[in-house]
Image (cartoon, rainbow, N blue to C red):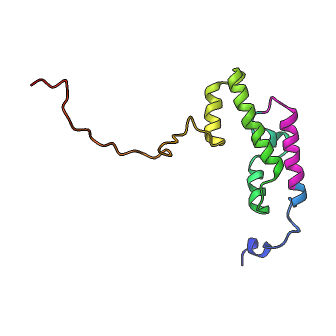
Amino acid sequence: MSVSEKMMGNDNAEKWSFEKAEAFCEKVLYILSSQTNIRTLGGACIEAGGYEELICYFEKKFKTVFQPIKKAKEIVKSRLVEQGLDGEVNPTMAIFILKNNHNMKDRTDVTTNDKDIESTPIFGNNPLDSE
């Protein structure tokens, strides 16, 4: 039996309790809310004394997404849109980040639900063909 298997279920060595994780997430939200120069969730996590991967760890460990993180992600998204429109940040980078990190698209095709359409050939007389 490996050391990690022996430690399964042992919470004594665990650094992050649910309460500590929740407090960290609230701190991240506070930092994002109060410091408009921070534009990413990772930047707020660093400012809070952690790193962004902690958020994924918390979600996996506690099987929940903390409300402060949901709000923090919305703040980041809104801030990028507003600052991109105002020219405060490079609009191309804002679009790139919004597409890759916030599941935004340029457009949605409501007629085909973004599925490819098989084109049907049209047969008939071509007015450009000479007889």
The picture quadrant where one finds residue 95 is: top right
**Residue 19 position within the rendered picture, expressed as x and y whole percent measured from the top left:** 90, 58
Give residue 37's position: percent from left, percent from top.
80, 29
Residue lying farthest left? Answer: 131
Front in this rendered view, residue 101 or 104: 104
* Towards the viewer: 10 or 24: 24
Query: Which residues are drawn in magenta?
Result: 21-38
Left or right: where 35 falls relative to 80: right
**Residue 11 magenta-drawn?**
no
Q: Quadrant of the C terminus?
A: top left
Number of marks in picture: 0
Q: Is residue 131 above or below residue 109?
A: above
| Picture quadrant of residue 77 | top right
Q: Is residue 73 left or right of residue 98?
A: right
Farthest residue, direction bottom: 1
Give the quarter of the figure containing the N terminus. bottom right
Q: 65 or 3: nearer the eye? A: 65
Instruction: Give the percent coordinates (x, y) of residue 30.
Output: 88, 40
Extreme-top residue of the structure: 87
Query: x, y percentage for residue 29?
Result: 85, 42
Question: Does the magenta stretch mainly form a helix, a strand or a loop?
Answer: helix
Image point (65%, 42%), residue name: 101
Magenta stretch containing residue 37, yes or no?
yes
**Quadrant position of residue 96:** top right
Instruction: Tell me which residue sits at (50%, 46%) in the image.
Output: 113
Residue at 71% over, 21% down? 86
Up/down of 94 relative to 86, above or below: below
